[in-house]
Amino acid sequence: MIRPDELIVDLFAGGGGASQGIYQATGRHPDIAVNHDPDAIAVHLRNHPETEHHCESVWKIEPVAACAGRPVGLLWASPDCRHFSRAAGGRPKWKAVRSLPGVVLTWATRVRPRKIVVENVREMLGWGPLLEDGTPCRARVGRSFNQWAGRLRGLGYRVEWRELCGADFGAPTIRTRLVIVASLDGSIVWPQATHARLPSMFERPWRAAAECIDWSLPCRSIFDRPRPLKDATLRRIAEGIMRYVVNADTPYIVLAVITGCGGRTGQSPPRAASSPVGTITTKADQILVTAHTAELRGTGIARGLNAPLSTITTAGTQQQIVEADLSPDDLAGAERVAAFLVSYYGQGGRNQSLERPLGAITTRDRFALVLVDGVARPITDIRMRMLAPHELARAQGFPATYDLTDGGRLSKTAEVRLIGNSVCPDMAEAVIRSIFHYHTTEERMVA
C-alpha cells in the first residue's frame, strides 16, 4: 500500500480520469497534479480540491522542489499520445511530443518514485527516430522505446507492460491502452479482469453501452435535413439497421414517451423483441424504439447497445446513436424507410433514388419490418444524433458525481476533448489496487 508519508503525483493529469481511479483505489486524492491546459486544471481542481495543482509544462516542474523532500510512492504519467497513435494517419510526427515520456526518466532519476505507471496507446511500443520528413523510420521502429525502458532498468526499476481494456474492468467501453509499470520494490502484480465478453464463473459480462444512453435527448430524423447526409453515412446507417434491428434475433427495444421534436422521457427496461410485452403498450404518446450505435468515421462499424462503446475520441464524433421508431400507424413513414433500406442495403437496389416510387416488397425481404411478440411492426422513422458529453463520460467510467463541466463553464467541445483524452478510472483503479495490493470490498469480505 501507499504509505501515509508518500506522495502521489499525476503528471499530464488532464480532467482527472487517472486521479479518480487512484482515489477509488486508495481513498486518497493525488498530492500533486500537473497539466499545461487551464481547462483541464480547472476541472481537476473542482473534483480533486485537496490536490496541489501546477498549470505548467511538465518540463518546467522541478521534481525535487515540487516534492519538498517527501518520498514519492506513485508517479502516474499519461503523455500526449497523438504522435504515437495511428489516428494521426500518415501525417508528420512532432519529435517534441513523442519525447514527452522522457520526463518520466527525470522524475525517476531525481526523486525515485517507488512505483511508476505510464499509460499510452499501444503504438508507443514502436516509438523510434523520425526521418527528415517527420515520418517514423521503419528500420528503427521501437528503438527509442527500448532505450527508454532500458534507462528505467538502469535506474534499478523492474519494468513490465501489458495492454489493458477498460471493458475488462467494468467500464462500458472497449478502450484499450498500453500500461507500463516500473517498480523499485519487487515484482509487479497485474490486475485480473473482472468482466469479459464471454464471462466464466469468475467474471461478469461486459457492461453495455445501453447503460449510458439518455433517452430524454432529442434525436433528429435522418430524412428531411437541411444538409442531407452523405451516401457513405446513409449506407452505414442502413447496414446497422439491418444487422441490429431488422435481422437481429434480439434487437434492443425500449418504450419511450414522446415529448415533441424527437425528445423522449422515461425508459422501460431493455427487452428482447421475442419476449412478452406484458403491460407495455404503444399509446398515442408512447413509441417502441430500437437502437444501436454507429461509427461514422474510419471503418464505420455499427455496434449493438448490449456491447460496450468503442473508444471515445477527443472530437466526440466517432459514436452516434441511431434509433428506429416502431409504430403500426404511420404507414407513409414506413414506406419511406423501406425505400431508404432498399436503396442503401437491398440487393441490386443500392442505386435507387429515394425520390422514385418503390416497387413491391415481399414479406421475405422484411425491409422495414421488425417482429415484436410475433407481430411485424414497421419502422416508421430513423433518427440519429451524437452522444452527449455526459453519455460519453458514463461510457468512459466516470461516476455521475464527477463534474467535467467546471460548474457549467466549459463548452461541450472542451468537455468532450477532456473525456476523449482521459484515462478510464476503472482501469486505473484496477492497476493501482493490484500493484499496491489494495483489496476490493468483495475481496475484504471473503478474507
Image: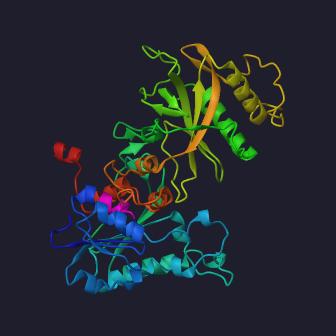
Horizontal and vertical percent position of residue 26? 23, 59
Q: Which SS does the magenta portion mostly show?
A: helix
Q: What's the coloring here?
A: rainbow
Report the front residue among 216 and 51.
Answer: 216
| Residue 132 position by quadrant | bottom right
Q: Residue at x 25, y 65 (%)?
A: 49
Identify the residue at image location x=31%, y=50%: 401
Magenta segment, which residues? 15-22
Q: Where is residue 440 in the image (x, y as percent from the top left)?
A: 24, 49
- Asked whether residue 251 is in view, the answer is no
One can see residue 370 in this view: yes
Please determine whether, in this image, residue 78 is positioned above or below residue 153: above
User: Which quarter of the rendering shows the N terminus?
Assistant: bottom left
Residue at position x 64%, y 48% in the image:
296
Q: Between 288 and 13, which is closer to the camera in this rendering?
A: 288
Residue 388: x and y, percent? 48, 48
Percent of width and height locating residue 262: 55, 34
